[in-house]
Amino acid sequence: EALPTVMADMMSLDNDFPSKSHCLSRWFGLQEFVVITPSQSSAAIESESRIKILLSSVSIALNNTGSPVPVFIQIQQYWRQMFSGACVLPGSSIDFDVIHLKTAPPQYSHLSGLLDVFKAKMATQVMPRPTVMVAVRFTYILTEWHNSTWPQEPPDFSSPMEDEVGCSDFGNLPFGASEDPVSEMQLACTWPSLSEDMIVENQNYSDLDPMQAPQWAVRIIMTEDPNCLLGKYLSEFLKISHRKETVEDLLWNLLSKEDDDQTGDISQALQKLTEPKVAKMYNIPSLSNVVHSASSRLAIKPGQAPINGDTLTTLLEFLFPDAKPVSEKTDKDESETESDKPSTKYSSIIEDLSKHLKSAPDDSLLHNLVTALVMVNMHHGGIRGVAQLWQEFVLEMRYRWENKFLISGINPGSPNLGTCLLYQKLQMLNCCIERKIKREQLYKGYTGQSLEEQKDSDSEEAVSSQLTTSDSEPCAASEEEQSKESGSSGTTATVSKESTDRLQQSRKEQQKQTSRKEKEGIPAKRPHLDSSSDDDDEFFECEDEDKEKDEEEENEEDGEEEEEEDNEEDEEMEVETIKAKETTTPEGEEVSMEVSGTSSSSYMDSITHKPEGRLAKSGDLKLLNSEEPLYIPITQDPSPMTEDMLEEHAEVLARLGTSSEGAQLRARMQSACLVSDMESFKAANPGCTIEDFVRWYSPRDWIEEDESTKENPIGHLSTRMQIPGNIWSEAWQSAKPVPARRQKRLFDDTKEAEKVLHFLSAMKPADVVVHLLPLLLHSSIVNIISNEDSDVPKVKEMIEHLISKSSMVTRTPHQHVRRYEDLVKLITLTETLIARATSLKAKFPSSLVESSSGKEEVEKFISDLLHINEVPINGGPTGPVGNMIHKLFVAAQRDLHMVMDDEENKEETSSNTVPDFPRPSAREYILRTAAPRPAPYSKSLPHKMTCSIIEGHEFRLAGAFASDTIFQ
C-alpha cells in the first residue's frame, strides 16, 4: 500500500541534510506544509494552554477539510524556531514537536542516548522491536589555512603612495579585498544509512571516523561584505558628483595673489623638470615659469595645500611625461610603460573595449587623470585635493595652447564622436594648437614667393632658374607649409612629433639658430617655437586684421572689374581674348603668375586673375573652356566639431524655421565650406566654370556623353545641379577667386581654444567627476580583466554582463549618476567574486594534486564553490579533492599543536597524539523506523526524529510520531 505523501517524505533518504531549505523541511523532510505565526514577533505564543487550544483548532479544521497537508504553529520566542504541528490522515495522524536547549545533556550527546530517547517516545510494546535506521553527519570547520597568504601585497614605503595598502603608484587603481573574503570551510562527512546495530557511539568510543565516511561535502562561508579596494575607491569618488562646491569655494582660504618675485611650492612644481642650465644663459621662459605666471591668479599658499609640492610634482610628471627632461628619463620608465600593458588572455577584449564604451583609448591622458584623481580623493585631501589637481590640469592646458605644445596622450585629428565629451574637448584643443602652429609657420615662412608642389616637367627649368636668384630655404619652407595647409594625411603625425621635440629642445634650438645667424651676419629673430609667444600672438592678430582690410579692398577692386566686364558686349569674345593671351605667355611667366603676391596685391575676376593656391594637377582633367589642366586647389580644412557643438548647430538650424528666409539662411550656413572650396578652385583655375568644379568636387553630378573622350570631354550637369536657384549655382556666383590662404578662416582656432579652456575652467569638481565617469568605468573594467585569472565561468559571465551594461550607460545622451552607482555595485560584486576565486585558488593549490585529471577536478571544484551552496566531493576522502582537503586539516592540526616538520618529530607525528581532524563543530542524527503505535495491534506507521547538536550553542530535537486512529 502506498504511503501518503507526508509519510513518504519523512522516510525518504533523499530529503536528508539538504544544503539549503526551510528548517522544518530539514528536520522532518517535508516538501509542503503550512506555518501559522503571530502577526508581531513580540506577541509570542508561550502559554501551554494556548498552544493546546490552537492545536486542537487546527486538528478540527483539518478533519473538516480533509486536507493531508501538515500545519505548524510557531511557539515561544521567534529566534528559537520552535514549532508544534499536526497532520490528519485517513485512519492516522502525525504529531510534530520540537525541543530546544542551549546545551546538550551529557547522556543525550551521543547516538546511544538518542536511541533511548527515540524508542521511549515511540512507546511501542511489539516484540521484537523494529530496527532503527540511522543517518549521521559530522561537520568539521577549518579557519586557519596553512598555506594561505594575505590577499594584498605589503605596502611599498618607497613608492609615492607610501604605506597605502594595494596602491603602488598613481597610475593603477587598487584591486582586490584587503581582508580574506573566505571566512571558513565546513567539511560535512555523511553516513547516509546505517543500522543501529552496525555502529557504536557513546561517551567513550565512536566508530564514526571521517576518513571512513562514504560521502563528503564542502561548504564555504564567505566574509560578509569584504573590504574591496576598487569598489571602495570608486564609491568615494562617486560621492563627489553630489557636491555643489566650485573650485574657488573649496580653495578660497588657500588662494592668495602672489607678487612677481614670490614663488610658491605649487607654482614651482615643474621647475626641476624644465629648467636646465641653458635657461641661465638665455632669457627663455621655462615650463614652470609659465605655469607660475598662469597660476598667480589662483596661487595656493605654500604649506597649506591639500597636495604638497613633491606629490604634485610626481603627479604632473605622471600626467605629462613629455615635460620631463630627457636626461631624467630612465630605462625604468620605459620598462614600467611596457609592464602596464596587460598580458592576459583578455587582451583582445581590452583592445576592443574602446569600441564598446564611449570613453577614450585606454592609454590616453584622461585615463591617467581619472586614476590620479581617484587616488588624490582617497589619500590627498579628498575633494579639495581633486579641485587642486584639476586646477593644475587646466593651467597646463592653457600653457600648452599659449605656447603651441601639443597635448600628449591625445590622439591627433578631429574630435572622435565615439569618445566621451571631455576627450573630444581635448582633441579640439589639440586641433587648435595644430592649426595655430601651421598658421604661424605659414606667415613666418612667407617671403612673397610660393611654388606649387607639382609642376609640369617643362616648367622645372624655369623654376630652377628662379631659385638661383632667390633664397631657396624660405621657398622650400613655404612649399612645405602649403602642403601642410592642404591637410594631408601625414601632417598631424609630423606636427605631433615636432611638438614633443620642441617641449624638450626648444632652448637648445634657439641657441643653435642664434649662433648660426650671427656667423652669417643675419640679425637673430625670435624663433616661432619659443615658449614666450605673447608678441607673436599680438602680431598675428594684427595681421589677421590687415588681411581682412586687404580682402575688403580687393573685393572692391573685384567689383569694379566685374562692372567693367558687364559692359562688354560678348562674353565669348572675352574668353577667346584671354585664351590668346594665355597661349602667348611664356612658360616662365606662367610660373611667375603662380607665385602668390603679398597682402597688398589686388585680385582680378575668375578669368583674368593670376592662378594662386595650386596643390597638384587633377590627373588628366582639363578645363572645359580651355586646354589648361585642371588643378586641385589648396583648400581649408572643414571646422572640426564636438558633439555638443553639433547639437548647438542643429538647434540653431532648427530655430530658423521653415520660411523662405530661414531656408536661405540655413543653406548659407551649411554652404560655408562649399563657398570656400569654390573660391579656392577659382583662384587656382582661372577661366573655370561650375562644370569644371563639379567634375572635381562631385564627379557623380557630371554625366558624360557617349562620345566623350579625355581629350574632348562632353557632358552635362546632373538634374539637381540644373535646378534654377540651387545652392551650388548661387554659391558659385557669390564665390570670388580667393586662395585659401587669404580667405576668412572657417575654423577660428583662437576662438575655439578659448571656448574649450573656458569649458574646462568653469567645471565644478562634481562636473569633472561626471565627465570622467565613462573613463573611470573603462579603467575599472580593464583592471578587473587584468586581474581575472581563475578560469571561472561565473566570473566570465559577470565580466560580459558588466561590459554590456556599461556600453549602454556610457552611450546614453545624458549621463545619470545613479546608473553609474549601479554599475559600481556590479563592479564591486565582480571584484568580490574574483577575490573569492583568487583566495580559493590559493587555499586549494594544484601543487597538492599530482595527476593532471586531479588538477582539472580541483579547478572545477573551486568554480562550483563560487555559485553552489554545498559542493559534493567525488570519491569522498579517497578522491583527489578529498585527499587535498585531508592534507589541509592535517596541516592545520599540526600548526594548532605546534608540531614541527623536522625529521626528529616524524615518529611522534605518525602516532595518534595529533588527530587529523578537530572535534566536530556540529553533529546531526536522523533516526527513523516503522512500528505500530499506540497499541501492538495498531497499524505499522513511520516515525522519525532528528537531533542537531552544535558545540556550545544549541541542542535540538525534532520528532514526528504517527498514531493509528482506528485501532487504538
Image (cartoon, rainbow, N blue to C red):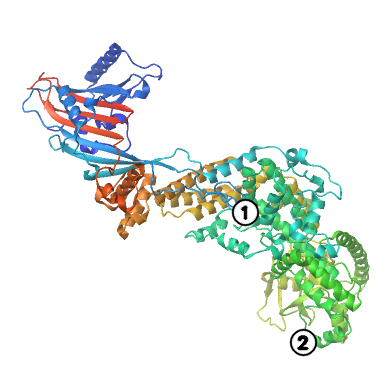
Q: Nearer the viewer, residue 367 or 177?
A: 177
Q: Going 23% across and 39% down the picture, which residue do you hit?
A: 14
Question: Local crowd at mark 2 within 10 Å, few (<14), some, or many (≥20)?
Answer: few
Q: Nearer the viewer, residue 401 or 902?
A: 902
Calculate the distance from the C-alpha at mark 1 to the C-alpha at mark 2.
52 Å
Left/right placement of residue 237 relative to residue 727 reads left
- The location of residue 56, given as percent across then percent down, is 25, 15
Nearest to N terminus: mark 1 or mark 2: 1
Q: Going 66% across and 54% down the picture, which residue do you hit?
A: 423
Q: Nearer the viewer, residue 721 or 429?
A: 429
Do callouts 1 and 2 mark residues in contact (Cβ within 8 Å)? no
Left/right placement of residue 905 relative to residue 344 reads left
Q: Is residue 151 visible?
A: yes
- The location of residue 643, given as percent across then percent down, is 68, 53
Q: Which mark is residue 697?
A: none
Which residue is situated farthest in the front direction here? 904
Q: Is residue 751 visible?
A: no
- The location of residue 142, given as percent across then percent down, is 35, 41
Judging by the rendered image, the residue that carries numbered circle 1 is 367
Which quarter of the rendering shows the N terminus?
top left
- The location of residue 520, given as percent across then percent down, is 89, 78
Secondary structure beneath label 2? helix
Question: Local crowd at mark 1 within 10 Å, few (<14), some, or many (≥20)?
Answer: many
Give the residue type at disc 2: Ser
Give the residue type at disc 1: His
Q: Going 83% across and 86% down the picture, which residue do you hit?
A: 464
Which quadrant of the structure image shows residue 143? top left
Which quadrant of the structure image shows residue 126? top left
Judging by the rendered image, the residue that carries numbered circle 2 is 457
Which quadrant of the structure image shows residue 10? top left
Q: Is residue 910 above or below residue 67?
A: below
In front: mark 1 or mark 2? 1
